Image (cartoon, rainbow, N blue to C red):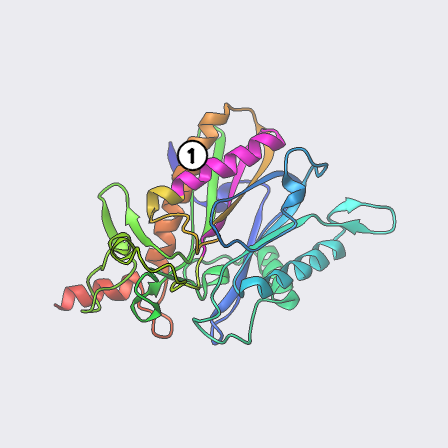
Amino acid sequence: MEEITIQEIPGFRMGNAQNLEAATGCTVILCESGAICGVDVRGGSPGTRDTDALHPVNNRAQTHGVVLAGGSSFGLDAAGGVMRFLEERKIGRDVGVTVVPNVCSAILFDLKCGRADVRPDSAMGYEACRQAYCGQWTEGSVGAGTGATIGKSRGRAFAMKGGLGTAAFRQGDLMVGAVMAVNCVGDVVDSQTGEIIAGALADDGVSMADSQRVILESYHNAKDLFSGNTIIGCILSNADIQKAQATKLAMVGHNGIARAVHPAHSVFDGDTIFAMCTGEVGTSFDAVGILAAEAVRCAIINAVKQADSLGQRVSYGELQQKWQKR
């Protein structure tokens, strides 16, 4: 298994657009030739668009774009701009009078990080596509990760900055990667060491409070104290798999969330993973699944480590600097 960049996986374009003042943005993953696509929703508070068509029993054969956006349910509007961009380039399902791009979307809640009255919209979705075609790609506090925060078990005052990250791997000619926007209730953990690397801060502002412990100790309180959450992402691969297997691949990808986030899939998260496959390389399903779960895990870690501080939310990098000064 060799680590590669996600841009090395052929057949996909990716782009971001964001408003740093408002602390929100969107990320697009495009496949002009169409990809077999599946989705799996594990969190208890999801926000999605056009995901029913991805069910294995339904008719949709290909998907041309996936949109990851902030803005809570308002951010689903960004998909309209992606559809307009693709239609202008004749990318989509030919219905005679026009083409209809198949575009799915999932959102995360970032309204409390910046300006609640500014959300990803059609114009921002269009701009993210333009950036994808220009080959402009960055990670960290950009795109859907712009206003992302993590570790809300003690409230927003003790949360840290999340972000957008990627990871990808190659085994022979098989390539699998993941794009993840990290905005979870829980803490992000390096599963190889067991160390909490980012999440809910303790009172000293530099130590980790341990979200699982905080949640367990307040088990009697069922009030939603953690609004502003969700991990969303997309697995990309050149694997040749069927539509039902793409759904299963999205499900297996959630193993990566479970390895990297404690607790994962809370009732206040809307954790959603898409899987897009271009069908170029014959492979066993389990081989793709192993690479996918690891790509998701590593993308989450990378999202946190590449994030920049924004507003009152300290980043992993800034926190490391504080530790060095102690």
Seen from the viewer's position, the closer of residues 318 and 311 is 311
Q: Which residue occupies the extreme left position in the image?
A: 326
Residue 202, given in percent of the width and then of the height, sits at 21, 64
Outermost right residue: 97
Among the 4 quarters of the image, the one containing residue 159: bottom left
Image coordinates for residue 185, horizontal then vertical, percent? 37, 57
Is 315 positioned to the left or the right of 20 in the image? left
Residue 234 shown in magenta = yes
Q: Identify which residue, 210 or 279, lies in the foreground.
A: 210
Type of amino acid at the residue the image marks with label 1: Leu
Answer with the quarter of the image where residue 56 lies. Answer: top right
Q: Secondary structure at mark 1?
A: helix
Q: Residue 68: x, y in percent?
A: 54, 55
Give the residue at mark 1: 291
Query: In the shown orientation, is residue 48 left or right of residue 262?
Result: right
User: Could you tell me which residue is drawn at 71 percent across and 39 percent down?
Assistant: 60
> In the image, is residue 253 above or below residue 46?
above
Report the span colored magenta.
230-256
